[in-house]
Image (cartoon, grey):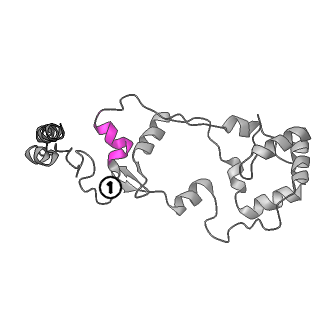
């Protein structure tokens, strides 16, 4: 019996496939060729190695035919918001010192979704520039100064010594936003950063 079992096991080993030989006879399937350029797009991908994942590549392949971005516009809320009185120096002194006071007059009521979508599709995060038919462009500090009238020189705003306690924050929310203290505490627990959400 021992001899018969031995012969049976030996025969079983012969019938098993030899994976090394099989794999050698059948070479692995060829993967998709590495893309080195895009028709109508970048011809040298050394600066844009991640271009294949960009929405522009999907557009060239015809995968995004009806696509646009919808922007959240809080302009109406800002226009209806009542600014603190001009005699509240603790508020206005900080705003003036920041150099951002002119932003109070900057707003937009109408948005061109198609234009914003086109600019987004032409923005390259790897280079921080827009790739337009006229060439490669970007936003400069001079543009920011001319369009928004924000100063691009001087020191950064220092918040040292200007932070308030939780109780002071509750007082301001109650006075300026008409929030009950209980709601303030609940909002403070879930807020992230130095801002508060309200409807």
Above or below residue 61? Residue 162 is below
Residue ID at (54%, 62%): 141
Residue 96 image offset from top left, x and y in percent:
77, 61
Above or below residue 61? Residue 47 is below
Q: Is residue 142 visible?
A: yes
Tell me: 107 left or right of 132: right
Chain part drawn in magenta: 52-62
| Residue bearing the label numbered 1 | 49
Above or below residue 126? Residue 16 is above
- In this rendering, the count of numbered labels is 1
Residue ID at (23%, 53%): 43
Q: Is residue 179 visible?
A: no
Tell me: 126 left or right of 158: left
Quarter that holds the N terminus: top left
Residue 120 image offset from top left, x and y in percent:
45, 44
Closer to the camera, 161 or 77? 161
**Which residue is farthest left?**
25
Tell me: 29 left or right of 186: left
Q: Secondary structure at mark 1?
A: loop
Residue ID at (79%, 68%): 160
**Which residue is farthest top?**
66
**Which residue is farthest front?**
1
Residue ID at (11%, 41%): 14
The answer to which quarter of the image holds residue 40 is top left
Quarter that holds the C terminus: top right
Instruction: Specify whether residue 46 is painted magenta.
Output: no
The answer to which quarter of the image holds residue 26 is top left
Closer to the camera, 82 or 186? 186
Magenta part mainly helix, strand or loop? helix
Residue 186 image offset from top left, x and y in percent:
82, 41
Instruction: Specify whether residue 55 is painted magenta.
Output: yes
Decide: few, some or many residues near mark 1? Use Cα within 10 Å; few <14, some 14-19, many ≥20. Answer: few
């Amino acid at each position: 019996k021992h001899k018969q079992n031995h012969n049976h096991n030996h025969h079983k080993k012969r019938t098993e496939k030899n994976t090394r030989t099989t794999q050698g006879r059948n070479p692995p399937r060829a993967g998709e060729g590495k893309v080195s350029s895009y028709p109508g797009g970048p011809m040298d991908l050394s600066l844009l190695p991640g271009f294949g994942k960009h929405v522009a590549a999907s557009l060239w392949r015809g995968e995004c035919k009806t696509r646009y971005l919808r922007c959240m516009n809080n302009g109406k809320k800002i226009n209806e918001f009542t600014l603190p009185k001009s005699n509240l120096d603790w508020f206005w002194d900080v705003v003036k010192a920041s150099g951002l006071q002119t932003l109070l007059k900057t707003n937009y009521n109408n948005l061109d979704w198609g234009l914003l979508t086109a600019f987004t599709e032409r923005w390259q995060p790897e280079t921080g520039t827009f790739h337009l038919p006229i060439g490669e462009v970007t936003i400069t500090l001079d543009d920011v100064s001319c369009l928004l009238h924000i100063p691009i020189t001087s020191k950064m705003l220092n918040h040292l010594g200007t932070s308030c306690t939780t109780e002071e924050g509750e007082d301001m929310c109650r006075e300026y936003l008409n929030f009950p203290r209980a709601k303030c505490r609940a909002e403070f627990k879930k807020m992230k950063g130095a801002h508060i959400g309200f409807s």
